[in-house]
Image: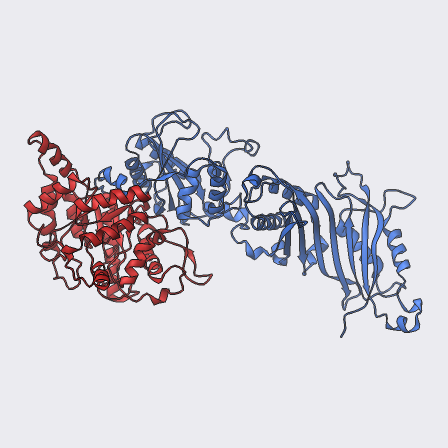
Amino acid sequence: MATLNVTPDSFSDGSTHNTLPTALAYVHEAVRVSVDILDIGGYSTRPGAAFVSVEEEIDRVVPFIQAIRSADPATTEDDGEENRMVRDMPISIDTFRWEVAEKSILAGANCINDVYAFTGPRNYPYPASGAAKEQTTEYMRQMKDVARKFAVPVILMHSRGDAGMNKDYSVYDYSDDGSVLEGVRVELGMKVDEIVKGRGCIRRWNVIVDPGIGFSKTVEGNLELLRQGAAVTADRLIGSGSNEKKKNPLAGFPQLVGTSKKSFLGMILYDKRGKSTEAKDRIWVTAGAVACAVQQGALVVRVHDTHEMSDVVAIADALWR
Amino acid sequence: MRDSDLIRVNDLLVTVLLHSGSRWPSKGSKPTAQPVHISLAIPHDISSAARSDDLSQSINYSTLASTLRTCLSPTVASHEEPAFESLEQILFRCFDVLLPHETTSAPRLPGAQIKIVQLKPPLHCKALAIEGETTFGSSASWRLTKINHIVEDLGCNPIIGVNPAERLERQLVRINITVESLNAKWALKHWLDFRALTRRLYQKVEETSYLTLEALASFVAVETLQHLQSHLDNIADYNPKIRVKAAKPCALVFADSSEVEITRYFKDYPMELTLASEASNRFDSSSSAIHCAAIALGSNVGDSIQNIEVALRLLENPLLVVGDRSTISQNSFVYIVNTSFLYESAPMYVTDQPSFINCACMIETNIPPVNLLQLVKKIEEIVGRKPSFRNGPRVIDLDIVLYDELNFDTRALEEQHTLDNLNGHLVIPHPRMSEREFVLRPLYDMIPEYVHPSLHKSISTLLNELTLISDDPPMDKIQFLRSLRTGNIEPQGR
C-alpha cells in the first residue's frame, strides 16, 4: 500500500505530493513497482495537526481520486497501458468521517482506512455514556452503513485518541506475551466485535486490522507489536481469570502494518547511533521494520517509498513466506 | 458418637427369577432364573456381645442369610415364584424381609445397607448392581435414604486418542457409571431400565471418535442423564448425581489403564438437556420469538464473492424474495448478525469443476425452519442457480446448517437412517457438516463453542477431529485484496 497524503501538513510527505501533477507522478511510480493499493488521506493524524472541516477534507481528496480514475488509456501505446493501470489502481480512503468515505467511494475509492476503527475521534477512554458515547455510536452506525452499502473492505486501526499520548498499557500486564499486544487485542477487538457482530454488521471477510504502530505506544511497545506481530491475530485466548477469558476477537484477521518513517524509528536511531533524523531521512530504518512485518505475516504494509520498499518486500517475502 | 459397628454378609449367592432378563431379554413372559450376589450390612452395637463373647447378644448372620435365600429363591412347588420385575424389586423385598413391620414378632433391626449384583447382566457389561440404604424413621416401616444404580465395566470400542495410530483402529474403553440418588423416592415408583441404558450407551459410544477420555466421559454423562430424563418422569427434580469413570486399558505400557472420573448433575448440561419438546415448542408457539440459525454459502460460478454478497442482501429482505405471505408472513425478519471469513476450497465429490468460495453467516429470524428453507431456495433461484447435477457447479448454494439447538428432520422416521434421500427435505443440523471443512471452518470463526445438538461435540472439536484425519491441505482464506478487486457493489435501496 502506497501512502498519498494530499495535505499541506502531513509529517512525512506533506509538501511534495499535494498538487495534482506531483500526486499523479507518484501514482505512476507506484504502478511501475507493482503497488497493490493506494491510500489517500486528506486529514493528517499527526499530533497537533490543524483541524480540517468535512467539506475541506472532501475537497482535498475527491479531486485526486477523480484524477486517478480518469487517467486516459487512449494515449500513445506505452503510456496508454500505464494509464490504464493507474486508472484501475485500487484506492483506499484514509478517513474517520462517513461523509468523506461515501463521497470518496462514489468518486472511485474501493476501501475505507479508519485510524479510529469507526468510533470517531472521541473514543479514548472508550465512553460508556454521555455525549461522547453518543458521538462514538453515531460514527459507528454511519461508518458501518457506508461500508455495508458499498460492500467495501475496511481497515480498522488500534488507536487511543491523541497519537502522542495514552501510552500506559499496565492494566494488561497479566498477559504472558506482552501488555501492548494484549491491549491491542482487547481494545481493537472490542471495536471489531461491534463492527462484525450484531444487526447491521459488516462482513468479516471485508475487515483488515491494523495494530496502529506509532499510535499511543512507547518505543518498546512499538517494537513489541512489530516483533510479535503475528500474536495480534493469533487464535488464542485473551483476558485474565478463567471467567474473563475468551477467544481473541482479532483471531484470523489479515493485518496491515504501517511503520513508514515513524518517529519511534528515529528515536531508536538516535539512541543507538546518536543520529538525528527527519521523517524524510528514515527510508532505511523503515526497510528494517517492513522486513519484520513481512516476516510476522502482515498481508499489507503501508509505505511512502514505494520504489525502495517493493524491493524490501520482495526479499522478505522470499525469505519468510 | 463413633461410627456404628456393622455385621455383614458378603456376596451371598442366590438364584432369582427376573422378568428383565439376563444376558439376553426374557423369552416371552417367562422370567429368567439367574444368580445374583447379595451383600448386606446391618448397623448393630456389638459391645455387649464383645464383652460376653455370646452370640445371642448379637445378630445371627446365618439366620439372615438363610431367611433371604428362602424368601428370594423360587419355591420348590411352583418354580415360577417369586419372580421379580427388576433389581429394585429384589432390593425392596430384602428390606421388607429384614426390616419387617412392627406388628411382627421378628427381632427389630435399626436399618440396613443392601447391594444386589446381577452377575449375568445385559450384553457388554461385567455387572449391574443396585445399592440401597434404609433406616427406620418415625413411621412403622423402613425408609429408603439412598439408592445407587451401578453399571460396572461396560466395554465399548470407539475411536479415541490423539495419536495418529489411534485414529485408525478402535480400542477398548471401560466405562463405569453410578447414579446416586439421595432423594430416593422416585425409585419406589419406577425402576431404571438398565438394558435400555447399556444398549444406548454401547451404541452411542461406539459411534464417537473423541480425542480425549475427558470428552468421552462427559458424553457418557450427558447420554446417561438424557436416558434418565426420557425414561423417568420428573427425574431431574430428584437431582441425581452421575459419576462416570472412563478407562483406557491400552494407553500406558506400564500401567493397567489410564482413567478419567467425573461427577455431574443435570444442571451441568443446560444446553444438551433442554427437553426436545421445549425446543420444538419454541418456534411453533409464537412467531415473535427470535431464533438463531447458521447458513452456509458456497459459489463456484461467475463472480463468486459478488454472488454471495447479493444472496446475503436478499436474505435480509425476505418479504421481497418470497411474495407468498403464507410462507413468509408479513412480520417476518432476518438479520445477519455474524459472518465468517471467506474460504476457497477444492470441490468435493465431483472434482472436475472450478474451486468453491465458501462462507457462513449467523442470522436472527422469526421464520420457522421449513419456511426458511423455502426462502433460501428462492434466493438460489434468483441469484441464478442453473439446474445442475448434484454436487456440481453452483452460482450460489445456501444451506441451513443449524437452527437454535434443534434436531430436525422432515423425513419419515423410517427414512432417517440414510443420507441418500435428502432431496427436498430439511435436516438440521446439516447431516454432512461434520465431514465438511468448508462448513466447519466458517462456523469456527463465529461459534467455536456451539455444541452440536446430536453429536454433543463443539464446533471446535469437530473441526479438530476432521483436520486430524484429513490429509487434504487446509482451505485457503480469501484475502482482502481479492475481494477488493471484484469491484464495488452499487448501493441498493431497501
Horizontally, is A263 left or right of B395 in the view?
Answer: left
Q: Nearer the viewer, residue B436 or B130?
A: B436
Residue B273 visible somewhere in the drawing: yes
Front one among B235 and B48: B48
For image coordinates 14% across by 58% down, the residue present is A11
From the viewer's perspective, is residue B377 above or below residue B464?
Answer: above
Q: Name the quadrant of the C terminus of chain A.
A: top left
Lateral position of residue A316 relative to residue B75, left or right? left
**B16 lies left or right of B432:** right
Colour of chain A in the rendered structure image: red
Q: What percent of the width, then of the height, locates residue B332?
A: 36, 44
Q: Position of residue A44 (x, y in %)?
A: 15, 57
- Give above or below for A124 relative to A253: below
Q: Indicate how the structure is coloured in the image.
A: by chain
Q: Chain B appears in which tint?
A: blue
Residue at 77% x, 55% y is B115
Give the residue at the far bottom of this rendering.
Answer: B1
Q: Is residue B145 above or below residue B426?
A: below
Q: Residue furthest front?
A: A273
Position of B231 relative to A241 (above/below): above
| Residue B109: x %, y % from top left | 84, 65
A267 or B102, nearer to the observer: A267
Quarter of the image for residue A134 reads bottom left
Residue B6 coordinates in the image, percent (x, y) = 81, 65
Quarter of the image where one finds residue B1: bottom right
Q: Can residue A144 be seen in this snapshot?
A: no
Q: Please state the total of marks drawn on the protein image.
A: 0
